[in-house]
Amino acid sequence: MSEGFVSTEEGPTVRCLRLSAQPWPHAFNEFNRLTILAEDAPDGHRLFFSRKIPSERLSVKLIKKWVKSCQRWHGEDCEEPLTKSVLEMPPNFRVIDTWARCVVQAPPHCRYLTLSYVWGPIEVFKLTSSNIKMLAGPGGLKKVWHCLPTTIQDAITLTSSLSERYIWIDSMCIIQDDDADKRGLIPHMDLIYDRGFMTIVAATGDNANAGLPGVRKKSRSCVQMVEELRPSLRLTCPKHLTDLLNNSVYESRGWTYQERCLSRRCLVFAHR
Ligand SMILES: [Zn+2]
């Protein structure tokens, strides 16, 4: 059991007990950590407990709450870019406008998300010198929507569900058959991830059709084990992000790992 002090806005500081069990030797035990369910913890003290994972769809409301909490409590640590680079964004820096459904020149200092994912051995639809004019027109993306890999479709859908307008995705924002365009952007990928507001990390599967589990109906299948000790006292065993990522193709690629490290905030999809 660990304990901590939780400051409340109006009242005095209260002591909070957090139940967890760590069996030994945990290297041989799948359930290396147990916690009570957040829903069974008192109001205002649920932050560090595992919550019940809705089986079908992710909760956009919950993600917005995480972002708000990050902005409120971490302040500059997460708001400021990791590097104090004075470099300006490259002039050919484009983003996907998820509201107008097209590829646009990034407005100055716009807030944008980024996607970090694995292309894998599939044919990925790309921005090229022959389709850029069509994709830059309002609604241009709709015309090729069915050609986009599932992960990219889900990332665009999620961005707009989060009420965010712009997202940067390499295959759709760099003209893939234009060497000058590539030269202008690829060396600045670190800056692009560093300046992004949040990175969506697609760490399930081994290709760009893996999708983001939970974004579309019935796309999530993770099973959460919950044991009820008595009414309103349930235990669960959360999986650690490092354990989930350790066996992933995503984590085995050097550049995706770099992209994640360069990002200020990450929304990681690691559960199927
Ligand atoms: Zn934060």
Image (spheres, rainbow, N blue to C red):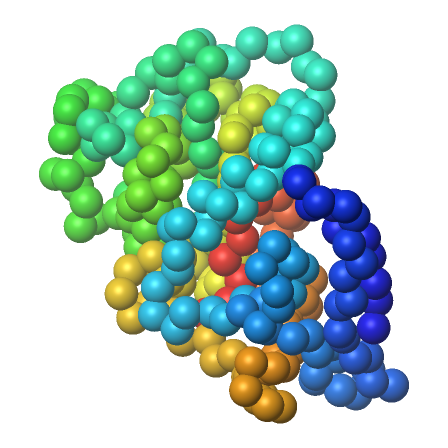
Residue at 56%, 24% in the rendered image: 195
**Is 226 placed above or below 179 here?**
below
Q: Residue furthest right?
A: 24
Residue at 53% x, 46% y is 66
Whether residue 189 sits left or right of residue 254 in the image: it is: left
Do we see residue 124 in this rendering? no
Image vertical order of residue 216 relative to residue 93, above or below: below
Which quadrant is the N terminus positioned in?
Answer: bottom right
Give the residue drawn at x 66%, y 9%: 86
Furthest residue toward front:
11
| Residue closer to the observer: 236 or 136 | 236
Q: Quadrant of residue 35?
A: bottom right
**Residue at coordinates 66% horizontally, 36% vertically from top-left?**
73
Res 94 → quadrant: top left
Residue 102 vs 171, above or below: the answer is above
| Left or right: 100, with 198 as reference point | left
In the image shown, does 9 or 106 lie closer to the viewer? 9
Residue 200 at x, y = what percent?
A: 48, 45
Location of residue 25 (image quadrant): bottom right
Residue 54's place in the image compared with 150, above or below, is below
Q: Position of residue 79 (x, y in %)?
A: 62, 27
Relative side of 19 to 93, left or right: right
Is residue 107 shown to the viewer in this render? Answer: yes
- In the displayed structure image, the side of residue 147 where residue 210 appears, left or right: right
Q: Position of residue 138 (x, y in %)?
A: 15, 24
For the image shown, how many numbered marks are present on the structure?
Answer: 0
Residue 38, percent across and down? 58, 67
